[in-house]
């Protein structure tokens, strides 16, 4: 497929991997800051933004292959690029690291726990119906209220969506809404190997805030319980940044 991307700056390469049903516009505030001393590349993942559409049966492995190919093109000598990923993009980046891809550092902002958030069968049907009807607003409202909201206990009130959709961020959600069911299925179907994750020898920084959803903390708790790691600050302090290195 064709992958669109934004690029700015000069120096060592940092690759930004956006979350589900967003695109590279999510990084517009961060790109010029990072580009002061590095080359920043922010692709639109397959099925998002200006990149090519999903194939017939999209899998998380397809996203991983795209990231591996792009990283090898940016770093042909294998020195290792830095990767910053957000939410569902964290799973793409981590799965790419499991392939042995040369990564010098991995930053994961609010990575969801594996298998979270849980989605009820009735919600899956509503998502499928909304996608078939090209109901982009309905898709975004379902995910934020009945998927993420159900997991956090903080559903967004209906009147708030009108205000959201009038913003550039809300428009980005609508532009990428049709990717939602496909991407959720791709992540749900992916099988993780604890052995492969444990073999990743890359410094990792988890960025999780005090008000981040509980499934982000479940990811941190899972990661810390399965590898001998050094980290800055104790989990009991619920610090915003926990540095992990295998």
Image: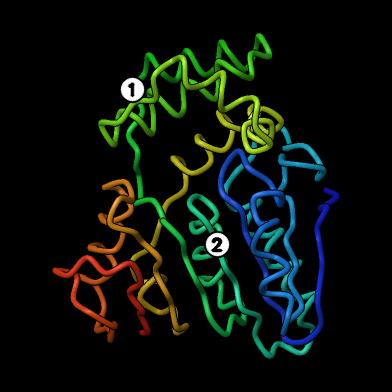
Residue 98 in percent (x, y) is at 50, 71
Q: Is residue 116 left or right of residue 48?
A: left
In-front residue for pair 22/180 = 22
Mark 2 vs mark 1: in front: 2
Could you classify mark 1 by the number of other residues whose Cα lies within 10 Å: few (under 14), some (14-19), or many (20 or more)?
Answer: few
Q: Is residue 32 left or right of residue 151?
A: right
Q: Residue at x 60, y 72 (%)?
A: 83
Residue labelled with disc 2: 85
Residue labelled with disc 1: 120
Residue 90 in percent (x, y) is at 50, 59
- Quarter-wise, where is residue 167 in the image? top right
Q: Is residue 225 above or below residue 211?
A: below
Disc with the residue nearer the chain's start (2 vs 1): 2
The CA span between labels 2 and 1 is 27 Å
Residue 189 in percent (x, y) is at 46, 41
Q: Residue at x 24, y 71 (%)?
A: 224
Q: Residue at x 38, y 34 (%)?
A: 148
Quadrant including the C terminus = bottom left
- Quarter-wise, where is residue 140 in the image? top right
Circle 2 SS class: strand
Q: Residue at x 51, y 18 (%)?
A: 127
Q: Is residue 206 above or below residue 57?
A: below
């Amino acid at each position: 497929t064709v992958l669109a991307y934004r690029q700015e700056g000069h120096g060592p390469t940092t690759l930004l991997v956006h979350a589900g049903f967003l695109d590279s516009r999510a990084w517009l505030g961060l790109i010029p800051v990072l580009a002061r001393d590095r080359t920043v590349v922010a692709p639109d993942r397959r099925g998002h933004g200006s990149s090519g559409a999903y194939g017939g049966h999209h899998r998380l492995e397809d996203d991983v292959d795209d990231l591996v190919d792009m990283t090898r093109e940016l770093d042909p000598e294998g020195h290792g690029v830095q990767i910053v990923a957000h939410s569902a993009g964290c799973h793409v980046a981590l799965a790419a690291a499991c392939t042995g891809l040369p990564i010098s550092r991995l930053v994961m902002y609010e990575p969801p726990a594996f298998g979270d958030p849980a989605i009820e069968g009735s919600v899956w049907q509503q998502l499928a119906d909304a996608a078939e009807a090209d109901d982009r607003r309905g898709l975004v409202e379902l995910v934020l209220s009945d998927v993420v909201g159900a997991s956090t206990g903080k559903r967004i009130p209906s009147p708030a969506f009108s205000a959201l959709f009038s913003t550039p961020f809300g428009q980005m959600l609508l532009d990428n809404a049709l990717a939602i069911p496909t991407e959720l299925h791709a992540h749900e179907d992916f099988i993780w190997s604890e052995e492969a994750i444990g073999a990743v020898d890359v410094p990792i920084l988890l960025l999780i805030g005090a008000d981040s959803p509980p499934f982000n903390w479940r990811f941190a708790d899972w990661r810390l319980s399965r590898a001998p790691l050094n980290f800055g600050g104790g989990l009991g302090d619920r610090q915003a940044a926990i540095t992990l290195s295998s």
